[in-house]
Amino acid sequence: MAAERGKASSRAFRVGPERGGERLDRFLAAEVSACGLSLSRTRLKALIEAGCVAVDDALVTDASFCVRAGQTIGLEVPAATDAAPVGQDIPLNVAFEDDHLLVIDKPAGLVVHPAAGHLDGTLVNALIAHCGASLSGIGGVRRPGIVHRLDKDTSGLMVVAKTDEAHHGLAKTFADHGKTLSLTREYLCLAWGTPTRASGVIDAPLGRHAVDREKIAIVPEARGRHAVTHWRALERFGADASLIACRLETGRTHQIRVHMASMGHPLLGDPVYGQGFKSKAARLSPQAQAALKALARQALHAAVLGFAHPVTGAPLHFESAPPRDMLDLQAALAAGAK
């Protein structure tokens, strides 16, 4: 399996009519064996208890859970690692902290957890130094405390678990996607062009690109994961660009970046999904062109994060203004549109 070679691996299995009622660990053991993968039932049970298995996108940590026909079972096998990350004195902008969790305002450029090419200097290294032994360990060796993540070049608010109790509660909240549990995630982005409507909803399943496996794409429902983004235009800068707020109903990898590109409005500075719009930079004012070059990343910021405290139940709400590079670009776009 890929994880045995130092790479993370994700699989999804559909429960057929004849398999309904089986224990989760037995179902997975049969499925991975049929795929030719080498994972013992003991190892699968450990992965289930570590929060690496989801049933219809809801985290399940009980190996004896009975699966039902029609359900989709997602399995993530963390990449193997030779050594645990160490604490590093990396400054953190902490918006909130108590004995169970902390909310940080992540700067652009900071990788969330160690991976190939980024074995240190990550948010996890900073968290280990900040929290010490209190950091929740159920996320795996390379990503203790991490419940959700932001792309390296996306800035903004993230919540991190300090205890296993908080980690389980937060994982359940994020797996629920705000359907029955309190969760609000809103991002601000600068996108190319101006939408013809003031607001809308993008409901399009996402999965790995058929050719470029490093990219995410809109794919047929049968092989994709449900993904919904609610957007509204906040400000238009002539015909060239817009400030848009995106509220996530689901939280898939690169969701906003792919969804916005799908409606013809990729994010400014996006090196992956906005490549076809590079020539449009020539239409911007010299000041906006300079600000876009200085940004050197996708113009995306996690601005609002709200959820119920996983231990106390208290409502928590946080807001973060975009960092200086995005504000400078926004100001230059506004000035050029006058």
Image: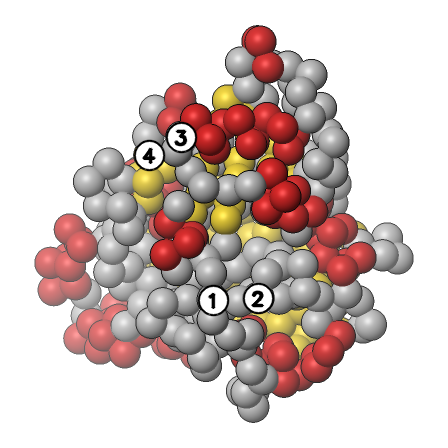
Q: CA distance from mark 3 to mark 4?
A: 25 Å
How many C-alpha atoms fall within 10 Å of the one at disc 2: few (<14), some, or many (≥20)? some
| Residue topped by disc 1 | 81
Quarter of the figure with the C terminus = bottom left
Answer yes or no: is residue 202 visible: no
> Is there a contact, CB below 8 Å, between mark 1 and mark 2?
yes
Rounded to the nearest whole Å, what is the CA distance between mark 2 and mark 4?
32 Å
Earlier sequence position, callout 3 versus callout 4: 3
Is tag 1's residue or tag 2's residue first in the polypeptide sequence? 1
Residue kind at label 3, given as amino acid type: Cys
Q: CA distance from mark 3 to mark 1?
A: 24 Å
Using the numbered discs, state the Cα–Cα distance from disc 1 to disc 2 in whole angstroms. 8 Å
Residue at 68 percent of width and 65 percent of height:
137
Looking at the image, residue 126 lies above or below residue 150:
below
Q: Which mark is residue 218?
A: 4
Q: Secondary structure at mark 3?
A: loop
Q: Which mark is residue 35?
A: 3
- The residues bearing labels 3 and 2 have C-alpha atoms spaced at a distance of 26 Å
Question: Percent x, y for residue 294?
Answer: 27, 78
Report the residue marked by disc 2.
Answer: 141
Query: Is residue 11 shown left or right of residue 213?
Result: right
Q: Point out the tag, 4 or 1, that comes first from the N-terminus.
A: 1
The kind of residue on which mark 2 rests is Val
